[in-house]
Image (cartoon, grey):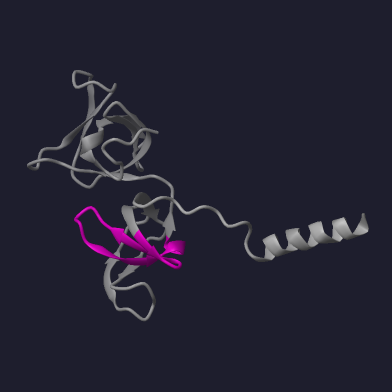
Amino acid sequence: MRKKGATALFVLATLFLSGGPVLAERALPYFATLRNGVTNVRVGPGVAYRVHWVFHQRGWPVEVVNRFGNWRRIRDNTGDVGWVHSALLTVRRAASIRTRDGHNVALRAAPDTEAAIRAYLAANVLVRPKSCTGGWCAVEVTGHGLDGFVQQARLWGVYPDENF
């Protein structure tokens, strides 16, 4: 009996020291957000690679398209790709508004094209999607205390057929 207790203690200590059990990786691709206000995006997966560009907005959505060790290859809303360390990303969801032909996007009171318009959102306005179904997402406009519904196709940070 004493040996079982020692074995269990060893297993628990090993899990604690290793950072816990290995969690299954998310299937690629997936959306994530930037953890910091300033994020270097590199041309390759490591600090030895030069900085390709720098993000200056915490919480900006990016699409993770590949991984190499602790590095993630990301794509931004313009289609540019580069590498960031996984510690610089969070799985908290965010999305930015995508406009067509420079026309702002209606934030509606209900998920219907005839619902009352609460606001018009310009390109790249940051929102937090709460849920998406039937081609509409319930969103909160980040930092403005405003919420409503946006057509799913008008968001970068949510896949067209994604429901949650």
Q: Position of residue 122 (x, y in %)?
A: 18, 42
Q: Whole-percent x and y of residue 39?
A: 35, 65
61 over 50 or under it: above or below = above
Quadrant the C terminus occupies: top left
Looking at this view, is 58 or 150 the one in front? 150
Depicted 112 relative to depicted 59: above or below: above
Magenta run includes residue 75:
yes
What residue sits 47% from the left and 54% below the top?
25
- Residue at horizontal 46%, vertical 63%? 87
Which residue range is magenta in the image? 66-88
Q: Position of residue 146 (x, y in %)?
A: 33, 33
Q: In percent of the image, x 33 and y 69: which residue is there?
A: 40
- Residue 9 falls within the magenta-colored stretch: no
In the rendered image, the residue lying farthest to the top is: 114
Image spot of residue 35 (x, y percent): 42, 57
Q: Quadrant of residue 46?
A: bottom left
